[in-house]
Image (tube, rainbow, N blue to C red):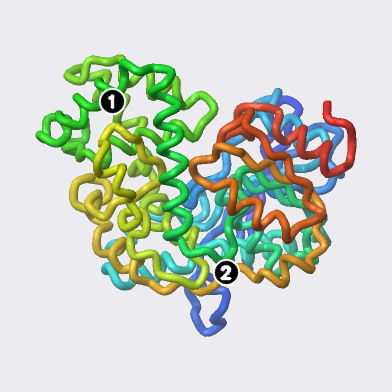
Amino acid sequence: MAAGTQVRRMMDLAVEERTLTVPLVWSDPADTRTIDVFAAVVSRRGGEHLPYLVYLQGGPGHEAPRVFHAPASPMWLDTALEHYRVVMLDQRGTGRSTPVGDSLLELGAEAAAEYLTHLRADSIVRDAEALRAELGVTRWSLLGQSFGGFTTLAYLSTDSSSLERVFITGGLSTLDRHPDEVYALCYDKMQDASERYYRRFPEHRERMRRLVELAAAGEIVLPDGEVVSVSRLRSVGSTLGANDGWQTLWSLLELDPASNAFRHDLAAAMPYGGRNPLYFVFHESSYSSGQATRWSAERMTPAIFDDDPTLFTGEHIRSEWTETVPAFRPWREVAMRLAEHEWPKIYDRDAIAVSGITGAAAVYLNDVYVPFEFSMETAELLPGVRTWVTSEHEHNGLRSGPVLERLIDLAHDRAVR
């Protein structure tokens, strides 16, 4: 595996950038296709010999955050750098790790879909192991946010001996429940979140009802030409999964629907933008371990959501978006093929249970993306990973509060600061 290295310095931070060339298909030595995997190893002056902590980003389809200055950004990084050198890994298909783009479609839908099947969490684990070997590290720790937590569970399924500790934030996924069960429960969470929002701002229910009418009439058109469907409009509820997401939603619903500001802010508020199509076409697969998804979120829509269009949805993908969203339209045939793909099992319950791993996990009681109930089922298999169950934060707690500080204290059995 070829590697390249470059070091940048910014104030008291050193950022060592590494690029590895690795197999696209780790499981088949006869397959000669390769991709690049990029990682930035961040350390603070005086911390050059601290142990390593690998940050696994949420998604799928999002690269690791970039580091520009000290105090370090994102906000959790300052806490991490007190204890670790931090490895910012661009998961395959994102950022500088041979990103997925529209050029992939030149292969044809069948070949593009096959390519994407090799970008799952188990392959990300193999990439991380290659990087660990390249750095000459015996064991390191992980910080998994959301989908990064799912990847951490995949890591524990195959390579727990490489791990010192794990920290998981909003990412204790179910190991073997069907995606249908996950999305059904996420609808319940979104119904609760919707009603909580309307209790605070009851006048917005009527405004949302009016927007639904406009969308049904094809009268909401975004700057990129998308004629917003009712289902796409309702997906702005995904903002309620963030600590301050209600502010985004409130600001949007206060605007004149005929204004440019509304059209631009609506485009920004809806999930699954076109920046990386992987987030849309690949998303439901992240909850699949041994099943085909077959547009699970769409199939599991409860009757109450059909009856009351003012209820917001979250990360509930609809197949109709492959026809109505300009950025998704070229990916329609790929998305259709992936929806029918029988994904292999990715988690090994027994291996996770005997891993003996220690660490800490933040489980958000009101999480609309990763249901609390299923997270606690998985937590039972990890007695060495102490759980902090909280309603103080939503799914993005790591990026908006001192969550990592709390988890490090828990993992080391220190009094909470």
Report the quarter where the C terminus lies: top right
User: Would you name the residue on which mark 1 appears?
Assistant: 264
* Residue 21 in sight here: no
Decide: marks 1, 2 in contact (CB < 8 A)? no
In the displayed structure, 68 sits above or below 278; it is: above
Element type at mark 1: helix
Report the quarter where the N terminus lies: bottom right
Residue 363 on image: x %, y %: 65, 42
- Which residue of the protein is positioned furthest toward the bottom in this rendering? 30
* Residue at x 68% of width, y 68% of height: 157
Give the distance between the C-alpha atoms of the residues marked 1 and 2, in whole angstroms: 39 Å
In the image, is 409 to the left or to the right of 298? right
Depth check: 73 or 392 in front? Answer: 392
Would you call the spot at circle 1 few (<14 residues within 10 Å), some (14-19), or many (20 or more)? some
Depth check: 8 or 309 in front? Answer: 309
Q: Earlier in the sequence, mark 1 or mark 2?
A: 1
* Residue at x 83% of width, y 47% of height: 51
In the displayed structure, 120 sits above or below 269; it is: below
* Residue 278 in sight here: yes
Q: Looking at the rendering, which quadrant does residue 210 occupy?
A: top left
Element type at mark 2: loop
User: Would you name the residue on which mark 2 appears?
Assistant: 346
- Count of numbered marks: 2
Kind of residue at disc 2: Ile
In the image, is 36 to the left or to the right of 285? right
In the displayed structure, 45 sits above or below 252; it is: below
Residue 280 on image: x %, y %: 37, 51
Kind of residue at disc 1: His
Q: Looking at the rendering, which quadrant does residue 259 occupy?
A: top left
* Residue at x 61% of width, y 30% of height: 393
